[in-house]
Amino acid sequence: MPLQNRVTPTGDIIATPHRGMFTGNRGIIHDPATKTLLKKRWSSAAWITCVCEFRGWRRPVMGRRSWTELFFLDEATAFAAGHRPCFFCRRDDATRFRAAWEEGNGVKNVRAREMDAVLHGERLEHGKKRLHPLPMPVAQLPDGAMVQQGEESFLIVQGRALQWSMGGYRKMEGAVVDAMLLTPPSTLRVLGAGYQPVLHPSAMS
């Protein structure tokens, strides 16, 4: 029975046998005795994305009273949900993200907690995922941006929209014509400033 620990682009946490390319956390949001989620879906404004393997360390998933291990299809999915790279296990990526954040958002010497504060305001609205108006046509969005149309989420790559699924991306039928932005606007500007997120291989096939 799969645990409820897989994050969708809308930030929901679901149970699925698919593991994903990245792990991460939002603080402690599970009961280690039952390995089930608590009612809350975050306990910290620092929503981070980590590598699944680091220095040979192994963590029992949801096995102790520590941060709750969540999993993402890829980095674009994590960004859409409102996460950012971890400065501990992904320092190089986090440093590149911060530099692109400063360039794209017109700030200097930004700290992780300052980025977290901005992201927390952009990813949530009354406790639920916040959607944003598109600042430009879908085809002009930077690679790695994600949008929502109806019940479906879409990744933008080279001006094309690919439909998200738990196992990967697939070509969509029709066009995205009435979408809202899933990726927080500040992160969208990070992508526009040149940060290249790690995408699932199906996005490039």
Image: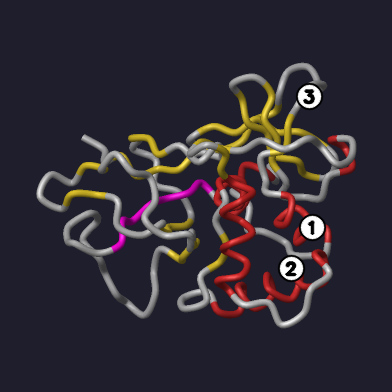
Give the CA separation, mark 3 to mark 2: 27 Å
Quote the CA–CA distance across marks 3 and 1.
Answer: 21 Å
Residue under the image location 39 percent in, 51 percent down:
42
Q: Earlier in the sequence, mark 3 or mark 1?
A: 3
From the image, which quarter does the N terminus lie in? top left
Q: Which mark is residue 101?
A: 2
Numbered badge on residue 143: none
Q: Disc 2 on helix, strand or loop?
A: helix
In the shown orientation, is residue 74 left or right of residue 107?
Answer: left
Check disc 1 and give the amino acid type.
Answer: Arg
Tell me if residue 185 is in the magenta stretch: no
- Work out whether 199 lies above or below 89: above
Region rendered in magenta: 67-73
- In the displayed structure, does residue 44 sit left or right of residue 168? left
Q: Write down the residue under mark 1.
A: 189
Looking at the picture, tell me which residue is in the foreground, 72 or 118: 118
Which residue occupies the extreme top position in the image? Answer: 174
CA distance separating discs 2 and 1: 7 Å
The residue that mark 3 highlights is: 176
